[in-house]
Every structure is written in structure tokens, then in C-alpha cells.
Amino acid sequence: MGSSRAADFPDERPNGLDDGLRPLDDELIGLDPDDPETKAFAEHLKNMRREQPAFTVEGYLAGVENFADSANRAGGLRRLSAVVVVLLILLGVAVSVWFGLGEIVSTFFD
């Protein structure tokens, strides 16, 4: 017996059949599904379509994970830029903690 509701999205498979890369079949027509480059391209398309929760802790952590993965794959100037961005963020956190601790210590021992 079929479902009484239509698929909300064209990539939605009936009965929950989804083995990870199958929603991308339409874009991979004519390519060998066992080829490693095709699998990598399908994974890239899957990542591009993935919607992450916005304005939540999980969304921010997923963004940090994506940034870290991209930085690890990058090389040369892009990797150096990612390292500089991370160091500037850590420097900002360290300065904020330093001033915060200074305020706490001056409050208690003033």
C-alpha cells in the first residue's frame, strides 16, 4: 500500500530508503557509481545540500567542524590564512580572559 502523502522534496525517497548518496542519482547519470572520484563528487554534493541548524550551539559547532575540515584539506596560503584566523580568535579569547580575571581579582582584593 502506498503512502497517502506526496513527497515534500524531490530527493525524498519512499519508505525512508536513503543509503546516503542515492538522492543525487539524477546529477550522477552516466558516471560509474564505484569510481572513487564519483563517490567524492557525490559526497561533495551531499555536503553542499546539507542544511544545518542556524543560531544554535549545534549549528555553530558544525560550522567550526566544517572550518576545521576545510583548513585541514587546504594547503599553502589558504592554510596559513586559516591558522592566522584561529590564532587571532585565540588571542582575543586570551585577552578577554585576562581582563576578566583582572576585574575579578581587583573586586575581591580592592
Image (spheres, rainbow, N blue to C red):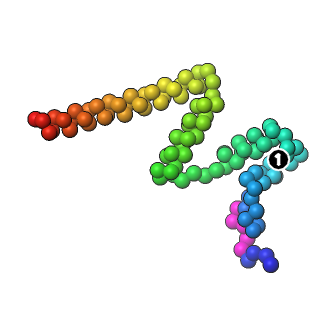
Which residue range is magenta in the image?
A: 5-9
Residue located at (53% from left, 25% from top) = 81
Q: What residue is rendered at 56% in x and 37% in y? A: 67
Residue type pointed to by label 1:
Leu
Question: Which part of the image, by quadrant, shows the N terminus?
Answer: bottom right
Q: Main secondary structure of the magenta part?
A: loop
- Residue 69 as seen in the image, left or right of residue 36: left
Residue 107 found in image quarter: top left
* Residue 39 x/y as whole percent: 78, 43
The picture places residue 45, in percent across and down from the top left corner, at 72, 45
Q: In this view, does 61 lie to the left or right of 12?
A: left
Identify which residue, 88 or 94, lies in the foreground.
Answer: 94
> For the point 26% across and 36% down, which residue is it?
100
Q: What number of labels is visible?
A: 1
Name the residue at the left extreme.
110
Give the residue pinned by disc 1: 28
- Residue 97 shown left or right of residue 67 in the figure: left
| Residue 55 seen in render | no
Vertical arrangement, residue 79 with respect to residue 109, above or below: above
Residue located at (52% from left, 40% from top) = 64
